[in-house]
Image (cartoon, grey):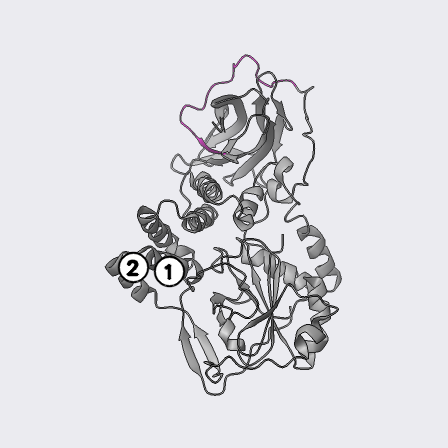
């Protein structure tokens, strides 16, 4: 896109052309930082649910004054002769161009229509409007709208994809429910199974998936962008959600096994188990099903149980996660640690990511053993304990 | 980021759009109208419709920062 930005500036300044971008990604703030970095000065619209139905990006279109597509994926070198300097007659039924101002839709009206007519389109339009205009506080309504649509059309991939977007958004919000990330991945995977040629859907899984299936690193540019923006004397726009390890990891052609020489920190299981679940864990395997010989990326998210008033104890060594693999399996992280908090007791979310490569003869479901060791306190200034939690990781294989 | 430029409206027609339900393949073929769509701006969340640019030549770029 920087190529088109640079090329179009003169035409825009001369009043010959308007430029509009539509970004196909979950997080608008990441695109805002990208636009700040690249100094894009044209409007960019956010389409997290792919309402246009684009199967892949980038797509560049030259559209005439009457709204007619004249060139798809034009070339910069011939843009003036192919499009800009040409005169396009209005279509026979064209009405005179009237300036318009777009407004947000009436969510209540769409709600009434969806419930009254109970059609797939009605639920989709209501769900779309909630995602685009309702804010995260209406995310549960959006999930319900898409689920109602899927009751009518269980094999509608676009509804499945949209549902996945909603679950991931809720996972990253204060409204998060246990299992939301896994629900998002499952919905995206279902969408992709229904249409394996849809690259927008495929990218959403690859974003969180193993390095062997990544086409590129997705968000590895963020640090460089922030540095270069600061060097210009500007403040980089803040991100609501920092990219995870998967989102900045480099693609890989061969699986790199790491940590073979590490030894288990509790080989005989002598550390007491966290029976009170002072630390809550969530495991998501991406993708949810693989063929034998393929790899998965495992996301382990851990947080102190707020109901139990639990806190990390940061006056000791960091939290450790040990990954035990059966014979013929490989991992790129045998013994992982998470950084300590900045105060003696904290209750932030911590996460681990590692990858597993399955053997060629794996089938059905394989349960791998991991366990975590941590110092946790029952309340601020309360009793602190050193505990272990066994965390099974299930890898499912396609039949 | 510099401010984004939107076309000025003199006499104004208000569009009340949810998201358009698109039919058919995307992108449209050459010679076909581009469906109108209303989406939030990444800058401030304001509603922006492609039909706001009617009357001007438009370069529409669908992309992602990844």
Which mark identifies residue A114? 2
Q: Which residue appears at 40% of the width and 66% of the height?
A: B18
Contact? badges 2 and 1 (CB < 8 Å)? yes
Q: Position of residue A262 (x, y in %)?
A: 67, 20
- Going from the N terminus, do you reach mark 2 or mark 1 first? 2
Magenta extent: A263-284
Instruction: Examine the rendering and report whether any part of residue A238 can be seen.
Output: no
Q: Which residue appears at 47% of the width and 67% of the height?
A: B37
Q: Position of residue A9 (x, y in %)?
A: 70, 73
Q: Position of residue B49 (x, y in %)?
A: 49, 71
Give the chain letter at badge 1.
A
Q: Main secondary structure of the magenta part?
A: loop
Up/down of B4 relative to A189, above or below: below
The verdict on residue A269 being magenta is yes
Give the chain letter at badge 2.
A
| Left or right position of A39 against A205 | right
Q: Residue A373 is drawn in which quadrant?
A: top right
Which residue ends up furthest to the left in the rendered image?
Answer: A116
**Tag 1 residue:** A125
How many neighbours does mark 2 have within 10 angstroms: few (below 14), some (14-19), or many (20 or more)? Answer: many
Up/down of A27 relative to A89, above or below: above
Q: Position of residue A137 (x, y in %)?
A: 39, 56
Up/down of A53 relative to A392, above or below: below
Callout 1: helix, strand or loop? Answer: helix
């Amino acid at each position: 896109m920087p190529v088109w930005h640079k090329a179009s500036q003169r035409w825009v300044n001369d009043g010959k052309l308007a430029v509009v971008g539509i970004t196909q990604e979950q997080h608008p703030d990441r695109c805002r930082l990208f636009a700040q970095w690249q100094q894009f000065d044209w409007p960019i619209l956010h389409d997290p649910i792919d309402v246009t139905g684009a199967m892949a990006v980038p797509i560049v279109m030259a559209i005439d004054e009457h709204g007619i597509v004249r060139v798809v994926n034009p070339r910069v070198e011939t843009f003036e002769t192919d499009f800009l300097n040409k005169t396009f007659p209005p279509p026979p039924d064209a009405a005179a161009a009237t300036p318009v101002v777009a407004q947000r839709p009436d969510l209540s009206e769409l709600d009434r229509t969806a419930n009254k007519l109970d059609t797939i389109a009605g639920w989709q339009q209501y769900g779309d409007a909630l995602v685009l205009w309702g804010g995260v506080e209406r995310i549960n309504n959006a999930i319900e709208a898409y689920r109602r649509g899927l009751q009518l059309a269980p094999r509608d991939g676009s509804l499945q994809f949209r549902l996945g977007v909603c679950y991931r958004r809720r996972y990253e919000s204060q409204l998060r429910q246990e299992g939301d990330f896994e629900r998002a991945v499952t919905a995206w995977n279902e969408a992709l199974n229904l249409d394996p040629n849809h690259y927008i859907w495929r990218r959403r899984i690859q974003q969180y998936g193993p390095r062997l299936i990544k086409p590129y690193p997705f968000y590895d540019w963020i640090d460089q962008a922030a540095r270069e923006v600061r060097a210009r004397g500007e403040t980089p726009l803040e991100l609501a959600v920092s990219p995870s390890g998967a989102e900045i990891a480099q693609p890989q052609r061969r699986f790199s096994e790491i940590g073979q020489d590490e030894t288990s920190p509790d080989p005989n299981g002598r550390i007491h188990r966290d029976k009170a679940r002072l630390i809550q864990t969530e495991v998501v395997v991406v993708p949810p099903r693989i063929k034998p010989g393929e790899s998965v990326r495992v996301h382990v998210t851990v947080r102190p149980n707020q109901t139990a008033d639990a806190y990390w104890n940061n006056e000791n060594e960091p939290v450790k996660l040990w990954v035990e693999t059966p014979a013929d399996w490989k991992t790129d992280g045998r013994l992982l640690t998470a950084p300590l908090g900045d105060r003696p007791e904290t209750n932030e979310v911590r996460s681990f990511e590692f990858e597993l490569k399955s053997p060629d003869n794996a089938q059905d479901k394989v349960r791998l053993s991991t366990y975590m060791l941590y110092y946790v306190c029952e309340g601020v200034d309360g009793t602190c304990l050193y505990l272990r939690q066994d965390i099974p990781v299930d890898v499912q294989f396609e039949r | 980021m510099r401010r984004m430029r939107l076309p000025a409206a003199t006499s104004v027609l208000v569009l009340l759009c949810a998201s358009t339900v698109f039919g058919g393949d995307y992108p449209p073929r050459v010679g076909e109208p581009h469906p109108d769509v209303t989406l939030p701006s990444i800058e401030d969340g304001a509603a922006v419709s492609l039909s706001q640019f009617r009357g001007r030549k438009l370069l529409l770029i669908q992309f992602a920062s990844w």
